[in-house]
Image: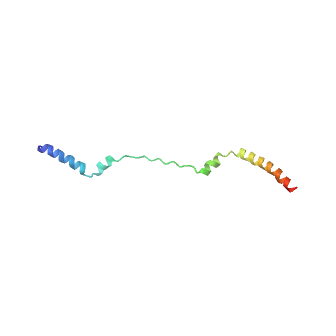
């Protein structure tokens, strides 16, 4: 091995075995993280309730159980 080839091989060896911050950064992958704020479960539930349907259901239940309650009093 001539002197020129020997010096090239030594340079390769030094480059592989030297910890350089620039070299370490080039080996790292970049990761992008996106965070999404999730609504609370109860907030989604309350937002999905139809108020008119709920009022109709309450009226139906009052009518149903009022007649049962009135029969018990007599």
Q: Position of residue 45 (x, y in %)?
A: 63, 48
Q: Which residue is most to the left? A: 2
Look at 64% across and 47% down and name the residue there. 47
Name the side, left or right, on which 73 lies relative to 12: right
Look at 72% across and 47% down and name the residue there. 54
**Foreground: 41 or 66?**
66
Quadrant where the C terminus is found in the figure? bottom right
Q: Which residue is most to the bottom? A: 73
Q: Which residue is most to the right? A: 74
Name the side, left or right, on which 57 lies relative to 47: right
**Foreground: 21 or 60?**
60
Name the side, left or right, on which 36 lies relative to 59: left
Look at 32% across and 49% down and name the residue there. 25
Q: Position of residue 52 (x, y in %)?
A: 72, 44
Quadrant where the N terminus is found in the figure? top left
Count up the numbered dots: 0
Name the side, left or right, on which 7 lies relative to 47: left
Q: Position of residue 42 (x, y in %)?
A: 62, 51
Q: Position of residue 65 (x, y in %)?
A: 80, 51
Q: How is the image coloured?
A: rainbow
Look at 72% across and 44% down and name the residue there. 53
């Amino acid at each position: 091995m001539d002197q020129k080839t020997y010096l090239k091989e030594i340079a390769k060896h030094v480059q592989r075995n030297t910890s350089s911050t620039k070299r370490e950064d080039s080996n790292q992958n970049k990761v992008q993280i996106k965070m999404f704020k999730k609504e609370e479960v109860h907030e989604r539930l309350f937002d999905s309730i139809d108020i008119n349907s709920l009022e109709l259901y309450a009226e139906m239940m009052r009518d149903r159980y009022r007649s049962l309650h009135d029969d018990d009093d007599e």
